Image (spheres, grey):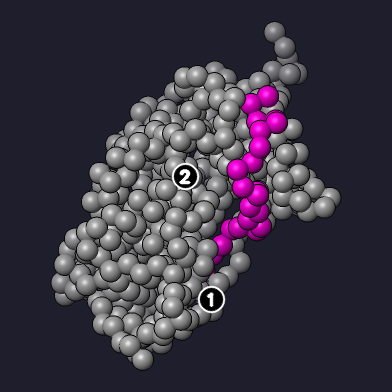
């Protein structure tokens, strides 16, 4: 059997894998990437948040991505009936990027992968990982290529960026139930023939159909728009008696007063895809000779578009910690990797949970707006969830809940004593 020897094997050529591989390669590491699918390929996660731009920039991938002229995302809009709340990333607490992109992931990921190849990184498409053995921190990975040939890849480190493929969690029995309630989504793309001119036509929006059910609208620069419905799995399943995803998504669009005219009669560009009970977690995020990044470790919920940011954050961090070890510096993976990532994931987990309780929506739509509160929440939504000078990061466990409680008390008092 053919044998290859590398320093680091990266599994998966999505954003996490490409950022990780590019950073390692830029620092003189012999790295190989194996990707099970053929690019371009359809994948969800089409709305980014500003924090990812730091990673693309640091990995040297930004120029190639910027040249694609993807739709710029300057903020996000949340709609609840007649109420509208708009967050502007340029008006947030602290430092950080003021914009990011809305992207068809097939084009975006392919651009990134081709740039990685252009740099000189060995990236092999249509290659499936079948087995992994560890000898201490060294690994032997058995891979089958697109022609059915088997090979063994020997590596000092594996970075698993396999996303929903979850290669190492499956092979090493690392999966564990998510702490979030079961939610599902159905999505597709449409040719946005009724797109309004100007900002309205390009703005990413989250339209709240019920407290726990919402529609996403993500316009792309190519004239298409991504449409998806998210909600408790029981609700999503109730949208079609026949379990027909096309009928279910049409029925969800009908529930939107805001978007029914724009999307009511528009054809879908592909059969809607259903992601059922999508939240994921793992027992551990690293072990001797491996680290799990992106969706191969944790996936929360699409409501605040945090998926790609956590993917690139963890991919870049795993690469940096490997480099640190190679310089002879001791790395505390539990604190420097798991601890760090869990702190950021913990903040977003609170925001996801409080979104679905309705408490965060109470803060979003409370009038008059508190500009200071809004700027601090905006920084969280932009992905800067490790900045503990922001009280909406540091005190995330209680702050949203307590503020929503005070607003409800104030509203009840006004109802009792109208002026």
Which contiguous range is marked in magenta?
A: 261-283
State the image coordinates of residue 196 (x, y, percent, origin top left): 54, 21
- Counting residues from the start of the chain, the first of labels 2 and 1 encountered is 2
Which residue: 48% across, 73% down? 167
Residue placed most toward the observer, 104 or 137: 104
Q: Specify the label residue 170 is tagged with.
A: 1
Question: Per the image, is 280 magenta?
Answer: yes
State the image coordinates of residue 98 (x, y, percent, origin top left): 34, 33
Mark 2 residue crowding within 10 angstroms, few (<14) / some (14–19) / many (20+): many
> Do the CB atoms of the residues marked 2 and 1 lie less than 8 Å apart?
no
Spot the residue most to the right: 241
Question: Per the image, is 366 magenta?
Answer: no
Label 1 residue SS: helix
Could you tell whether 329 is left or right of 366 in the image?
A: left
Could you tell whether 156 is left or right of 210 in the image?
A: left
> Secondary structure of the magenta portion, mostly?
loop
Q: Specify the label residue 104 is tagged with.
A: 2
Which residue: 73% across, 14% down? 417
Spot the residue most to the top: 419
Hey, which quadrant is residue 90 in on the image?
A: top left
Which residue: 58% across, 28% down? 193
Residue placed most toward the observer, 257 or 284: 257
Mark 1 residue crowding within 10 angstroms, few (<14) / some (14–19) / many (20+): few
Which residue: 74% across, 45% down? 248
Quadrant where the image shows the N terminus: bottom left
State the image coordinates of residue 45 (x, y, percent, origin top left): 50, 49
Label 2 residue SS: loop
Could you tell whether 319 is left or right of 48 in the image?
A: left
């Amino acid at each position: 059997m053919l044998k290859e020897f590398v320093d680091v094997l990266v599994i998966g050529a999505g954003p996490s894998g490409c950022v990780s591989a590019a950073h390692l390669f830029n620092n003189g590491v012999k790295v190989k990437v194996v990707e099970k699918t053929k690019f371009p390929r359809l994948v969800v996660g089409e709305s980014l948040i500003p924090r990812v731009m730091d990673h693309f920039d640091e990995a040297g991938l930004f120029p190639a991505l910027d040249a694609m002229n993807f739709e710029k995302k300057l903020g996000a809009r949340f709609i609840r009936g007649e109420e509208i709340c708009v967050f502007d990333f340029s008006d947030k607490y602290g430092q950080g990027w003021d914009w990011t992109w809305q992207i068809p992931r097939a084009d975006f990921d392919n651009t990134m992968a081709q740039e990685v190849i252009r740099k000189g990184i060995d990236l092999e498409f249509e290659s499936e990982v079948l087995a992994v053995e560890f000898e201490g921190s060294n690994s032997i990975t058995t891979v089958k290529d697109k022609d059915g040939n088997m090979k063994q890849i020997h590596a000092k480190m594996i970075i698993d960026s396999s996303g929903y493929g979850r290669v190492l969690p499956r092979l090493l029995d690392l999966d564990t139930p998510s702490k979030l309630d079961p939610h599902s989504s159905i999505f597709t793309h449409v040719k946005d023939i009724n797109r309004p001119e100007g900002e309205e036509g390009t703005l990413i929006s989250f339209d709240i159909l019920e407290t726990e059910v919402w529609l996403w609208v993500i316009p792309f620069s190519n004239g298409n728009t991504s449409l998806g419905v998210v909600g408790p799995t029981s609700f999503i399943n109730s949208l079609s008696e026949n379990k027909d995803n096309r009928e279910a998504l049409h029925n969800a669009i009908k529930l939107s007063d805001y978007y029914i005219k724009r999307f009511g009669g528009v054809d879908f560009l592909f059969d809607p895809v259903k992601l059922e009970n999508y939240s994921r977690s793992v027992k551990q995020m690293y072990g001797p000779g491996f680290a799990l990044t992106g969706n191969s470790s944790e996936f929360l919920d699409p409501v605040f578009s945090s998926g790609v940011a956590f993917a690139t954050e963890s991919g870049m961090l795993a690469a940096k910690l490997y480099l640190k070890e190679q310089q002879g510096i001791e790395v505390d993976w539990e604190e420097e990797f798991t601890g760090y990532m869990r702190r950021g994931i913990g903040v977003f987990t609170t925001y996801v949970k409080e979104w679905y309780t309705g408490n965060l929506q109470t803060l979003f739509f409370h009038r008059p707006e508190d500009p200071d509160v809004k700027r601090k929440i905006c920084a969280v939504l932009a992905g800067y969830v490790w900045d503990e000078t922001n009280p909406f990061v540091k005190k995330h466990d209680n702050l949203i809940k307590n503020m929503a409680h005070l607003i409800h008390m104030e509203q009840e008092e006004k109802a009792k004593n109208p002026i």
